[in-house]
Image: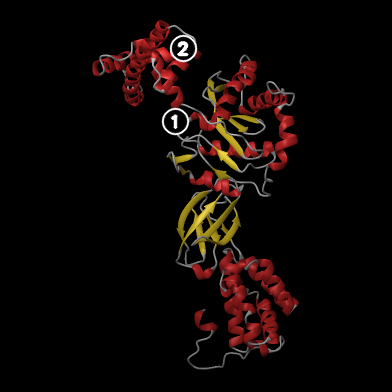
Amino acid sequence: MEVKKQISILQGLGYGKKTIARELGLSKNTVKSYLDCCTGSIEGDQSDESRRKDLHDYLPYCQSELPRKGVTRQILWAEYRGRYPGGYSYSQFCEYLKQYLDRKDVSLHIEQQPGDKLYIDFAGSKMSIADPYTGEIKEVEVFIAVLGYSGRTYVRACESQRKEDFLSCIVRALNYFGGVPKVLVPDNLKSAVDKANPYEAEINRDLLDLGNHYDMAILPARSLKPRDKAWVERMVQIIYTRIYAPLRNQVFTNLDNLNDAIIERLESHNDQPLQGRKESRNILFETEEKQHLNPLPHDYWELKEYLQVKVMKNCYVQLHRDRHYYSVPYHHIGQKVKLVYTATYVAVYLHGERIAYHLRDRSPYKYTTVKEHLPSTHQFVSEWNPGKFIEWAGHIHTDVESYIRKVLDNKSYPEQTYRSCVGILSFERKAGKDRLIAACQRASSFGAYNYKVIAQIIGSKLDRLSPAEKQPTMPIHENIRGANYYK
């Protein structure tokens, strides 16, 4: 090959056959044979180069057509030979097509960083639980979460892939790891993504709320791109071997029992040394990744429900699901507000600002009140109760307190009773403390316990008469028939 190369170089420099033969110590016929061979090879190379170029131009078309139903390599090769009769044979065509597709399918190795990404998905195969009474078998979903750097894994069985179960599993996974990664990478399931997009998916509002609560970015994998979540895809296969297989012959009657068994096998999986390394996933997590996770927030995340309501004239809004009422600052009466509620609290928002917060009470037709939300007059009314009125009356006099107790005992409807008490005790301000005490004493001697009696005594100034002093008797008059008339 070296000699042939030298002959080609010298010919290119313009040397003749004789000179080349002399310079290289070869016979003239040998040089001539070499040159004839090179010429034929060059012509052959030029012909092959032309065929290769034709095939290269045709291969993108093959790549786009292959995924279509019924299209095979044989069909594409037949079309290729119809377009280029002097083209490659079927075996060569298939080999070049394979090389082309392999180059287009190159994967990028992503170097994982500690505490960076958490990959989550549901396993394709389900597990099952059996009803202890009927024996009915119910399939359940299996949630898997994998930290990209250490590979530490969390697995949990749940009833479904619904949003409530999906988000609950994420919260449990974060608690299991004891920290929060920078990025959460879910699949494009409906519980995570409202609308898939290869560039910017529309993430479910509740998943976004969870991410914001934990200060964690949400970056869904691209649809039909399993390599975006290769860590969890590969882990699913491992979980089949290390959890599904060992538990395949056991019967579980509820999710709690099943998850207890899963956790036991899961710890064994995380403690097992990685292939080709001495460290296990747990060791790698504890020594190199755990310190890079962000701390968990102090408050527990809960799934939120949303409701648009109008503030009623009494300063309350109603949570229709519970038929319960919650107070709102009175200056928002008539405005439309947003109720955001969870299993434990109810919050009221106006233009993105929280204006009220209450612990959730599921008692129907009851009111939860913050005193400061009501106008001053309403605040007073909201505090009405028997103890308040007895204490108020006791500050005036023991006889007034005794009278108010009798009023409270006589009335059957609380609001009517409270109004009578307010009316009676208000005479302290209108008529004076002493007159009110005297009026209560006189009314008690008659055995009459209500607001009208006190008002009549004070209005007629009967409270100023001494207890021994009698009221004026009826005068004698000819128009008065007397008792004898009716005998």
Compared across the picture, whether 133 is left or right of 45 comes to right
Q: Residues within 10 Å of mark 2 (few under 14, many from 20)?
A: few
Which amino acid, by three-letter code, is at mark 1?
Answer: Leu
Q: Is residue 466 visible?
A: yes
Compared across the picture, whether 451 is left or right of 57 comes to right
Residue 153, horizontal then vertical, whole percent: 65, 30
Q: Of the numbered discs in the image, which one, if any, rests on residue 22?
A: 2
Compared across the picture, whether 263 is left or right of 302 comes to right
Question: Which is more N-terminal, label 1 or label 2?
Answer: 2
Q: Nearer the viewer, residue 423 or 237?
A: 237
Residue 69, horizontal then vertical, whole percent: 32, 20
Which amino acid, by three-letter code, is at mark 2?
Answer: Arg
Q: CA distance from mark 2 to mark 1?
A: 67 Å
Disc 1: which residue: 224
- Judged by depth in the image, the label closer to the viewer, 2 or 1, is 2
Residues at discs 2 and 1 in contact (Cβ within 8 Å): no
Residue 308, horizontal then vertical, whole percent: 45, 56
Q: Nearer the viewer, residue 156 or 87?
A: 87
For label 1, the SS is: loop
Image quarter of residue 279: top right
Q: Nearer the viewer, residue 129 or 10?
A: 10
Question: Residue at left 50%, top 68%?
Answer: 332
Image quarter of residue 14: top left
Image coloring type: secondary structure
Question: Residue at left 57%, top 40%?
Answer: 184
475 shown above or below 117: below
Residue 400, horizontal then vertical, whole percent: 70, 77
Q: Is residue 129 visible?
A: no
302 shown above or below 79: below
